[in-house]
Image: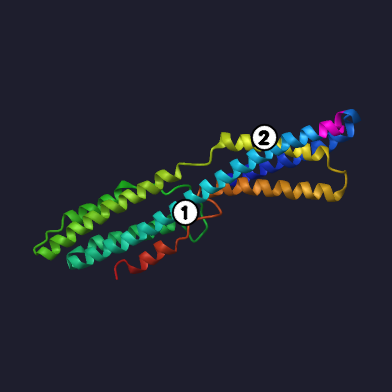
Amino acid sequence: MAAVTISLIVFSFVFGGSLLGIHLRAVLPANQLNSESRDLLKLGMGLMATMTALVLGLQLGSAGTAFDAEQRGLTEISTKIILLDGALAHYGPESEEARDRLRSSVAQKLELLWPQAQKQRSQWQPKSSDSDGIYYLIQELSPSTDSQRAAKAQALGILFDLGQTRWLMFEQQSTSASMPLLLVVASWLTVMFVSLGLFAPRNATAILTLFLCAISVSCAVFLIVELHSPLSGMIRLDSSPLRNALLHVGQ
């Protein structure tokens, strides 16, 4: 809910700034709003609007890239889970315990991250006990043929790659939106909307237009914050790759 809260705060400041501008227009002396002042204000607000659009665009693009990276990481993890189960299956019946442990671990992660009861979880923090248990079970295997030795080595290699990808995803989640930068952008937007209110007529159409514009910029802030929380927000990663992997594990 952090993204909703932040976007609502931005909306209140931005739309409040426009209402403040409308009020200032009614109380300021006429010589303060002459043509020269209007021209200077338009130039200044044009510069500020350009900087704000550039920063918002870059932040939104960065957030979208981070979200896509998390989705690719989840797909990669799902693929490696299927490959790990396949390597254990090729080893033989002796690996059934490790395969059962792998399936149980995947099912637990699915329930943790995408619970049926719509519970909220903040981050996917890999637990060493998950991979360690499977690692020790694989290490305890005693291959008797070249095929089993190759399958065991392959399974261990995939397991190490799987752990690396999981920790990489976890570390990427810690890179959240920059709050100081969003604060600066919000202050720019507030000043811009104050200037818009200064020259807006006092009628319902103008106020509705300012209201919709304030919603638009606050939605942009919402997307920036939300896309940096792919496992806990409203816009979440697609669980289909991991669910498909669960269907293949143990088969």
**Span of residues in magenta:** 32-38
* Left/right of residue 4 with respect to residue 230 in the rendered view: right
Q: Position of residue 226 (x, y in %)?
A: 55, 49
Look at the numbered disc 1 and give the secondary structure of its residue.
Answer: helix
Q: Position of residue 129 (x, y in %)?
A: 30, 48
* Left/right of residue 97 with respect to residue 23 in the rendered view: left
Residue 214, numbered label: none
Q: Marks 1/2: CA distance?
A: 29 Å
Q: Residues within 10 Å of mark 1 (few under 14, many from 20)?
A: some
Q: How is the image coloured?
A: rainbow
- Decide: is 139 above or below 198: below
Q: Residue drawn 64% across and 49% down?
A: 219
* Left/right of residue 236 with respect to residue 83 in the rendered view: right
Q: Position of residue 234 (x, y in %)?
A: 56, 54
Q: Could one spot residue 75 in this view of the protein? A: yes
Instruction: From the image, give the main secondary structure of the stretch colored magenta.
Output: helix
Q: Residues within 10 Å of mark 2 (few under 14, many from 20)?
A: some
Question: Most extreme residue toward the bottom, as rendered?
Answer: 251
Q: Reply yes or no: does residue 33 show up in magenta.
A: yes
Label 2 belongs to which residue? 187
- Decide: is 75 above or below 18: below
Q: Residue drawn 67% across and 36% down?
A: 188
Return the residue nearer the eye: 102 or 23: 23
Residue type at tag 2: Ser
Of pointers 1 and 2, the one earlier in the residue sequence: 1
Label 1 belongs to which residue? 68
